[in-house]
Amino acid sequence: MGARPQAELKFEDVATEKHPLEYLYTDGDQHWFMNPQTYEQVEVAAAAIGPRAAFLQAGMTLAVEFVEGRPVNVEFPDLLEVRIADTAPPTHQQQDSPLKTAKLENGVEIMVPQFVQNGDVIRLDLQNMKYMDRVRADGAKTKNARTGR
């Protein structure tokens, strides 16, 4: 029997399972999660999470994908509420750009509209790392980056 030509090889469907797990802490390049029903702890390699690991917060519940009992991916929500740690005050002069740099509490830098201030909580699109809108203290949305409303 000869080997199959590459074009004929097919990927088999890999059975994945998803479990909602609570993030606990990071130890080196391992991130520890817990099943809130069984209290079983699971370690997930940093490589399975990638740069999104900067957005892990103790107590957050995320879907963790398993293949053959091993965690392979952590699913984050599309939008995540994050707090602005440091940004310049708004300028009242004519600007070349309506955006300015802001540093989040986790150290990640993003671009935000001029009206965003230190301490503001915003909704961040994690796929694009883009500001979506500002969250008021009562949890409602305020100004949207696209519509200005």
Image (spheres, rainbow, N blue to C red):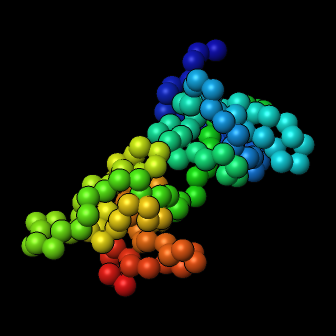
Q: Nearer the viewer, residue 102 or 41?
A: 102
Residue 46 higher or lower than 77, as above or below = above
Q: Nearer the viewer, residue 75 or 33?
A: 33
Residue 70 location, quadrant: top right
How far across and how far down the image is residue 32, in percent?
A: 70, 34
Residue appearing at x 40%, y 46% in the figure? 108
How far across and how far down the image is residue 119, in percent?
A: 44, 61
- In the image, taking residue 94 as reference, residue 87 lies left or right, namely right
- In the image, taking residue 114 as reference, residue 123 lies left or right, namely right
How far across and how far down the image is residue 52, in percent?
A: 50, 44
How far across and how far down the image is residue 74, in percent?
A: 62, 44
Q: Residue furthest right?
A: 38
Residue 143 higher or lower than 66, as above or below = below
* Residue 52 seen in render: no
Q: Quarter holding the C terminus?
A: bottom left
* Residue 53 seen in render: yes
Residue 25 higher or lower than 85, as above or below = above
Q: Residue furthest bottom?
A: 149
Q: Nearer the viewer, residue 115 or 71?
A: 115
Residue appearing at x 26%, y 64% in the figure? 89
Residue 81 higher or lower than 53, as above or below = below
Q: Residue furthest top?
A: 1
Q: Quarter holding the N terminus?
A: top right
Residue appearing at x 58%, y 34% in the figure? 48
Residue 49 location, quadrant: top right
Q: How many marks?
A: 0
Residue appearing at x 85%, y 36% in the figure? 40
